[in-house]
Amino acid sequence: MEINEATKHGVNVFIFDWYWYDGRPFMETTLNNGFLKADNKDKMKFYLMWANHDVVNTWDTRLNKVEDGNVIWTGKISRNEFEKICKRNIDKYFKLPQYYKIDGKPVFMIYDVPQP
């Protein structure tokens, strides 16, 4: 339904926030079980925006009054972890016909580029 409404109003690309914490992906369900399983997914493209920011307890209403700014998961990763992420996304997403490309190159957005 969302794809039909989006394309009907001129939207032809969805950007999916994509997360990686503790050596694994988080919150891929909307993309994997929603968009990529939709019968009409060929009507539009998608790409990933890696939300590589820290997760603090202000996001968790059960903890947000305990200690504001307490980091639960860090967005910082090693070079080896970055290479693992890149290989996984190339193999799993970038090769899909629905993946958005500019001049034949897959678009991959990074939320916080200076994040070491």
Image (cartoon, rainbow, N blue to C red):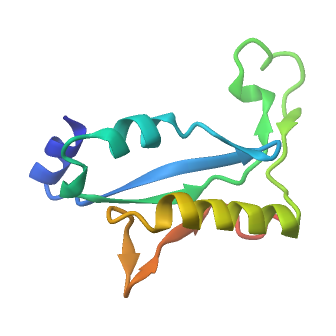
81 versus 51 height, above or below: below
Q: Residue at 85% x, 28% y: name it.
A: 68
Which image quadrant for residue 83? Answer: bottom right
Q: Residue furthest top?
A: 62
Q: Residue furthest left?
A: 8
> x, y percentage for residue 100?
37, 68
Q: Is residue 46 toward the left or the right of residue 2 in the image? A: right
Assign the C terminus to one quadrant of the image. Answer: bottom right
> x, y percentage for residue 58?
75, 27
Which image quadrant for residue 81? Answer: bottom right
95 versus 49 height, above or below: below
56 versus 86 height, above or below: above
Q: Nearer the viewer, residue 48 or 41?
A: 41
> x, y percentage for residue 78?
88, 63
Q: Nearer the viewer, residue 62 or 44?
A: 44
Q: Is residue 30 toward the left or the right of residue 74 in the image? A: left
Q: Residue furthest front?
A: 91
19 versus 66 height, above or below: below
Q: Residue at 89% x, 32% y: name it.
A: 70
Q: Is residue 69 toward the left or the right of residue 89 in the image? A: right
Q: Residue at 76% x, 38% y: name it.
A: 55
Q: Residue at 37% x, 88% y: name it.
A: 103
> x, y percentage for residue 52?
71, 54
Assign the N terminus to one quadrant of the image. Answer: top left
